[in-house]
Image (cartoon, coloured by chain):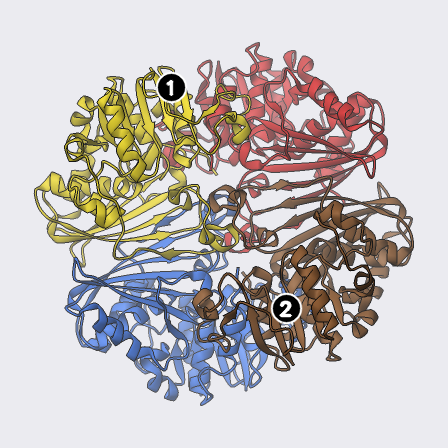
Chain colours: A blue, B yellow, C red, D brown
């Protein structure tokens, strides 16, 4: 299979190259980057020196005809159009932007600042969280790869909402994210001396990932459950924690068993006996999940950890590709995940 | 005034030396540390070289007679007895441990693993959060200096609980702490290579600071409001964020105004227009506070930032000392706070 | 004394505000920043909220008439002209750029990329390293405040070159710098995720600070001693280490005694018994200095640590101001240094 | 091939498990750790959950009979005896300690504090730096795996000393190391809050790796060239820079060409056009090398970067194993290196 990575010089693009260069069923046939067009991969990113794709050249334009699968790592708005063009040509597309994640087309102006013109395609797009939508992904031509916060949060919520053990209409989610989640564009507040030793909440009452999460919850439960979501920046490059609290009537053993059963055959979800640590998942496609009950308040406390650039973006995109193309879901992805977590 | 710092070689002890060395009404007359007894301050902590107390010698034993004020920076259990002895001698004591923080004596075995024998003194101890208990502190001989999480959280809750605008019987609190909050004793998981690049929740359903917070809430409101509390470790040395969520019927403007009014004369609480950053408070006695309402869910979102070793421990102890001794509350403390926040 | 800080929104400008706001003989009368003109200090830098200068407004233009002392924190080239104007008006100027640091006017095109037009003023400018040029600074109207690397390195070299114990014509200097030394302008390689966990040498054979160091060495010794200089970036915000190696015929005790004697009355140089740690000087005007001899190779190994924004820039500028204006050299500067070093 | 890892719970042991679990010609048959004997690998190190060796049990005692190859990750002194026993039984041993690195047996008391009793075995031990001693490693039963500083430094020096272009009898080496190089045992100065934001030189005139470096130089050149070596700690977990300066009569092009030629067929040495960054090698067996000449001083400036736990320890041990057992030197090692470097 020949793949094209569009927006290949951002963090998710480079991470895709890492995962796909290990995938023997795949040839990275094109990498597209306006900023670096004409340059060799290893001249822009020296850590690719003496690796198989070191001499690959960044191209200016997307060749929309020649390849089998397109990974789009573009800003949200430009992705809308390009996805349309590629799917019209019958290509398989995995879009890492938010352009096709939310079913309600009216949310785009409010949360992303642009009008979305392709409602029909939006309907057909499959939300690429395999642990929930695996069957749909198998048949999809267009997968909207989930955001990092929704991935971490929905994996923590899914068994609870699926089995309808969430009491009430609100769940409270607090999350921590490494700074790579904000992308590669330089910003004053991510200038090293200013981000160093700093941590803070941001967008505490209106974050773009909220409708994405609520949309999936509604599709799973048929109910309007609100997500009270506070994301926080912490001074690491990679890693994400989502701490999810909801009211429930279950006892602790029931809750733990519910999660254990739901995820027992999942290759990339690990139920862990202590609250998960980002260090144990960074570099991998794993999601570590801790399940507990606060008996004093009758609230479930579910805590997940992922690599925001891995299961929260690029390795999940590869997982989706495997599913879409009929390969074993964990092919090359499991081994890569096993061997690239560093300790310490 | 002559003061003694007992347990002076831990992080809160050293931070007290920093604050008190700038306080011209105070002489640091004794520093006690079993581990370093006989050694000069500057030989153990070289950053004190060429500073006024560089030649002060750590002593093995507490001189319980000679000084006016005792700051105790000891583990919880040994503090119980020493506080008793010193207050029996009529000394003013500021105890930075949890030994006298919780009014319900029965919580000590459950949360701290020891029986507390001095119930009467526990009743008399004043909880040293000046923004709530200033009047009591003025008359106190024994101040139980609050924990870092309770300080950050209670300052975020106080106007809400005082004015009874919290709806329901649970508040959800998520907090982030720098690692200095765990003290100076070495531990495997705080060994630099392992803590580096890591973050995680801990004690997610039973943290020692929970009863301390609920105890104060009950004293303020007369009601049993539960705190659903998840603390997280983040890889910085200092700094703490507490993100507090509670149901309310207030509108956003009312909520903001409530907090603005409550704290308008507080020298160390700053209402800030964006979620607070730990970098803006580290090194100081400030608490930065952000107030918002999630109109979708009807929940207040209050976020506070403090220095866990400052307002969360040692500089708050100095604030308490000023109040107990009739000095202006911000004396030497405000200036020191103003000038020791580093940017970047 | 009324002072103006020009370029007040960069790191050295903000650090000057911190130091000068504690200096009771000084009023910060003007802060100039094109980027933030019209904005309040505390709205741009929230950590100044509830501090004395919180309401000071950044101005667009320099008032060249009204103030006594001007601190210039500008890029090198614009500083050349402004310094000329201000000194022509009889103002005292402390220039934190390199515009007047190097005596040889021909070095400017080579190392800084512009022609310097004011050779006569260059001759009159005094290099603001008080431990070497104190007497000249007392009489100066224009002080060229040294670079951070030259400060750390020259303090490590000075006793050795002054007493002519350096054998040979080359010294080898390796230095480590926190990233704040590169200024506040955002850059891709200082974007947090990329600088995180990274370290590297840069400009290993042609760094701008080399001629500045060699120039001072020549003025002290009358000889051409070359500096083989390799600077390295390390992933902290502040702090600098300079490790200086030179051949010598001294014995270890002689070498240590030489340094001890030279610096014994210096308020800000501390001879330390172990290699200095940046953590012990960050936030202060101190330079910690370690002196050793490698008996196997006959080489002196002198290691210094400073805060690149402190003794390497802004607090040294205040030290120069004190000297230029006849104040005690350490006035307000020593106390501030003592109390703003954080441990941990 | 069945391998045993002795001392498997330290950083180099865990890193060996990572590399060897990807090596299909190898079965990790035994992991030995006194501290964790009886525990499952994944219970001690949760990041191994859902990986092939997750259920492997740490054993208390070394089975000295059953396996083909032994990797020893022990302290120096205990390693001396165990290496002797294993080699007497005809086992292949790769020793990651310093127990058999230095040919001169008299250096052990001075640098390591113990008498070495096995001079004959010391003579037979092969120093496991493949780029220099590949031919000897092929025939070796005992490989003394190099220290991290010597690996980085000798790779930077080797072409220069081999071709005798070093002028004079001293080279000056400054190195930076991440803290994992100091091992997994907790220490006060590596407690996170104290190591955070800190950097410093240590053992500036007597570091244990100095004789190891000088010993190899002497074997290559036949001459006594001294290494003036200053190591520095920087606050990262992994990564090492060595900056090597020596006098030479070569022109820059000659120098660059010399290095290019020497290493042109090396799979793990990459000559890079800019000073190397640790981020580009962490997780891998690569050594990135930059070659420059300071024409002003006539000194070569060679800068290398490695992962101290990779090429500086465990992956180099695997490289040695491949060579000793007749496998392609880069087997499984190259691919793993290519895919586990994270950006950012």
Q: Are marks 1 and 2 in contact (CB under 8 Å)?
A: no
Q: Going by the image, does D281 lie left or right of C195?
A: right
* Subunit bearing disc 1: B
Query: Quick one: SS at disc 2?
Result: helix
Q: Which mark is residue D265?
A: none
Res. D283 in view? yes
On screen, A72 above or below A323? Answer: above
- Of A221 and A282, nearer the camera is A282
Q: Which mark is residue B23?
A: 1
Could you say where residue A68 lies in the image, as x and y percent from the top left? 51, 86
Could you say where residue A42 lies in the image, as x and y percent from the top left? 66, 67
Res. A8 in view? no
Q: Residues within 10 Å of mark 1 (few under 14, many from 20)?
A: some
Name the residue located 70 percent from the left edge and 70 percent from the top edge.
Answer: D86
Residue D82: image quadrant is: bottom right
Name the residue located 65 percent from the left edge and 22 percent from the top edge.
Answer: C128
From the viewer's perspective, is the residue at label 1 or at label 2 nearer?
1
Q: Which residue is mark 2?
A: A41
Could you say where residue B230 lies in the image, as x and y percent from the top left? 28, 54
């Amino acid at each position: 299979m020949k793949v094209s990575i569009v927006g290949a010089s951002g963090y998710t693009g480079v991470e895709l190259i890492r995962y796909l260069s290990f995938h023997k069923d795949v040839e990275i046939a094109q990498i597209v980057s306006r900023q670096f067009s004409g340059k060799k991969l290893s001249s822009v990113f020296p850590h690719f020196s003496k690796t198989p794709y070191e001499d690959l050249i960044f191209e200016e334009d997307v060749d929309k005809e020649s390849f089998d699968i397109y990974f789009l790592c573009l800003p949200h708005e430009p992705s809308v159009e390009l996805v349309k063009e590629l799917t019209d040509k019958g290509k398989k597309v995995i879009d890492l932007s938010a352009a096709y994640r939310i079913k309600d087309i009216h949310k785009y102006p409010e949360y992303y600042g642009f009008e979305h013109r392709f409602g029909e395609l939006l309907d057909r797009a499959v939300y690429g969280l395999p642990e929930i939508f695996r069957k749909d992904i198998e048949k999809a031509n267009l997968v909207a790869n989930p955001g990092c916060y929704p991935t971490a949060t929905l994996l923590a919520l899914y068994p609870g909402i699926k089995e309808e053990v969430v009491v009430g209409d609100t769940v409270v989610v607090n999350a921590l994210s490494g700074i790579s989640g904000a992308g590669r564009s330089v910003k004053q507040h991510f200038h090293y001396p200013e981000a160093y030793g700093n941590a803070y909440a941001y967008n505490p009452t209106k974050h773009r990932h909220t409708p994405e999460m609520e949309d999936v919850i509604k599709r799973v439960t048929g109910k309007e459950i609100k997500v009270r979501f506070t994301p926080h920046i912490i001074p690491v490059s990679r890693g994400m924690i989502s701490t999810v609290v909801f009211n429930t009537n279950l006892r602790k053993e029931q809750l733990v068993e519910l999660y254990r059963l739901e995820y027992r055959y999942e290759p990339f979800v690990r139920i862990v006996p202590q609250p998960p640590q980002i260090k144990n998942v960074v570099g991998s496609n794993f999601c570590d999940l801790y399940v507990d009950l606060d008996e004093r308040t009758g609230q479930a406390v579910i805590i997940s950890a992922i690599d925001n650039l891995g299961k929260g973006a690029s390795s999940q995109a590869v997982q989706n590709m495997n599913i879409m193309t009929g390969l074993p879901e964990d092919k090359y992805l499991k081994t890569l995940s096993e061997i690239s977590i560093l300790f310490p």
